[in-house]
Every structure is written in C-alpha cells, then in structure tokens.
Image: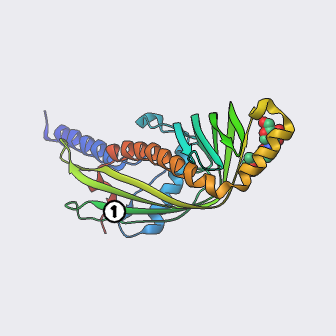
Amino acid sequence: MSYGKHLIIFTVATALWAAVGAEILPSPMKHCTLHDEACILEQVKIYFREFKYGLPAWNIPSVEPLQLGTLRIKSGGASDSMQFSLIMRDTTLHHFSDRAILRSVKGFSADLTKPLKLIWIVNSPDIEVRANYEVDGKLLILPIVSKGTMVINLSQMQSKTRITAVPEQRPDGHSYLKVTDYKTVAKVSSGSFNMSNLFDDNVELRDSTLKVLNDEWSALSADIQPKILEAADRAYRTVLQMLFDKIPYDEFFLKE
Ligand SMILES: *[C@@H]1O[C@H](CO)[C@@H](O)[C@H](O)[C@H]1NC(C)=O
Ligand SMILES: *[C@@H]1O[C@H](CO)[C@@H](O)[C@H](O)[C@H]1NC(C)=O
C-alpha cells in the first residue's frame, strides 16, 4: 500500500471519528461552555420541544405525559372529619414538559472529583394529573366508596429540583454522571379536581361532595401533592440517568 493510500485511510478514519465525536448530543441540541447558563437552558428547552415524546434511538421514553404508575395516599385519622384511602392507578402527568417555563439550571462543574449539586427551577402554568381511582373513606358521616376516573389540576406550580450526580469513570475511559439523589419541592397557587362515578354519578351528591373536597384543597394537597412529586421525581430521574448514560460528561461542555 502506498503512503498516499495510508494517508487517505487515516484521513477518512479521523473524519469519521470526529463526526461520531461531534454527535454526542442528539441533533439539534448543541454543546455549551460550562458557564453559559443561557445556552444550557436552551438545550433543555430543545430537548423538551424535540424529544418530549421520547428519543427512540436512545431508548428514552416519552415524558409527555409522564407515566407515574400507582400512587397510594392515606389522609386523616379515625377522629378527623375527612378520612380516606385513595389509590390512583395508571397515573399520568400532563403539561410539565410542553408548557414549563424554565427559570434556571445551575451547578455544573468541571471538577470530576466531587459530586455535582444541580438545581433546576421551573414554573408550570397548568399541570394536569389523570388517573383511575379507587377511594374508601368518609366525609363527616358520609361514607365515600367509589372508583372511576379522576383529574387533578395544579395551577402556577413553582418547582425547585435538587439533583446530586456523581461523576464516575466507565470502562470506555470516559466520566459519566450517576444520579444519586433527585428531589423536587413545589408550591402550587391553587388546585382543583374532579372525579367521575362518585355516588354513581348522583349529580347533587357528587357536586356538593366535590365542592367540599375542593374547598378543602389545601388540606388535601398536603397529602396528595408530595406523592405526585415523588412519583414524578422517580420518572424524571430514570430519564435523566438514561441521558447521562449516553453522554460522556467529560465531553459534554465545550472547552472555554
Ligand atoms: C382542568 O383544567 C382544564 C383545562 O384548563 C379544564 O378544562 C378542566 O375543567 C379542569 N378540571 C378541573 C377539575 O378543574
Ligand atoms: C367533572 O366530571 C363530570 C363527569 O365526569 C363532568 O360532567 C363535569 O363537567 C366535570 N367538571 C369539571 C369542572 O371538570
């Protein structure tokens, strides 16, 4: 083989390698420098816009709606006026990824020897949670035993998520992030909900009960909201880990 041929093969191989190297992120996402928060926020927006229904090439599931699975909620004790045990199955959370307004993403670091502490702040104008429910409880002296479908609306949710991720070296020689903690706290300005099939859809009884329950929203939400957030954190953590498993952290940022 001539020197020229070697050179061509070498050049082609280098070009291929460079092309693969440049495609760590799924197009149209691009790399940012570490301290360019606006650029990083933009990439998260692009991810939600382009890949909210999943990224099949990487086996990443849809986040719109987000699948929350089964939630079990107990509220009140025997002496409380309202007391129930609620099971929500096939729970889905809608309009986080497509309507969220991203406020900030902070905490990335070039130091691969320490855990990263990421903080992500988001405002969500109108989140909807849907589920098949089963409830067994009582309101004053009225027993409530029913199953059907339920919708919970959460307005103006402001959420702050703290993520801890540890850089770890994998057999390919690159550092990847392993998520070790993912926790969201949130404030919601108001909430409302609806349930089908309550009292066999006896309209008067259903509407008056739903009115009482909705008026009690702040008490109810203290029991329900944390379960929703916990389930959403689990689902998002899984997706984030799948993304981090594909993106070598040491090649994530442009050199400054
Ligand atoms: C939830 O919000 C949707 C859209 O804004 C609305 O159509 C629906 O009636 C609301 N449901 C409840 C239970 O508030
Ligand atoms: C609540 O659900 C019932 C029956 O499923 C429906 O007729 C009613 O319009 C709903 N109300 C709201 C506020 O969504």
Which of the two residues, 36 or 202, is positioned nearer the viewer here?
A: 202
The foreground one among 46 and 210 is 210
Whether residue 135 is visible here, answered yes or no, is yes
Quadrant, the N terminus = top left
Foreground pick, 44 / 39: 44
Q: Position of residue 253 (x, y in %)?
A: 33, 60
Residue that badge 1 annotates: 117
Total marks shown come to 1
Q: Residue at x 57, y 55 (%)?
A: 222
The residue lying at 54 percent from left, 42 percent from top is 73
**In the picture, residue 117 is in which quadrant?**
bottom left
Q: Dot 1: what SS?
A: strand
Give the x, y percent position of residue 132. 63, 32
- Note whether 194 is above or below 183 in the view shown: above
Image side of residue 75 versus residue 205, left or right: left
Left/right placement of residue 19 relative to residue 63 reads left
User: From this viewpoint, which residue is outermost toward the right?
Assistant: 204
Q: Quadrant of the C terminus?
A: bottom left
Is residue 27 in view from this perspective? no
Q: Nearer the viewer, residue 143 or 113?
A: 143
Kind of residue sitting beneath label 1: Lys
Residue 6: % across, % down: 17, 39
Local packing at callout 1 (Cα closer than 10 Å; few below 14, some 14-19, many 20+) is: some
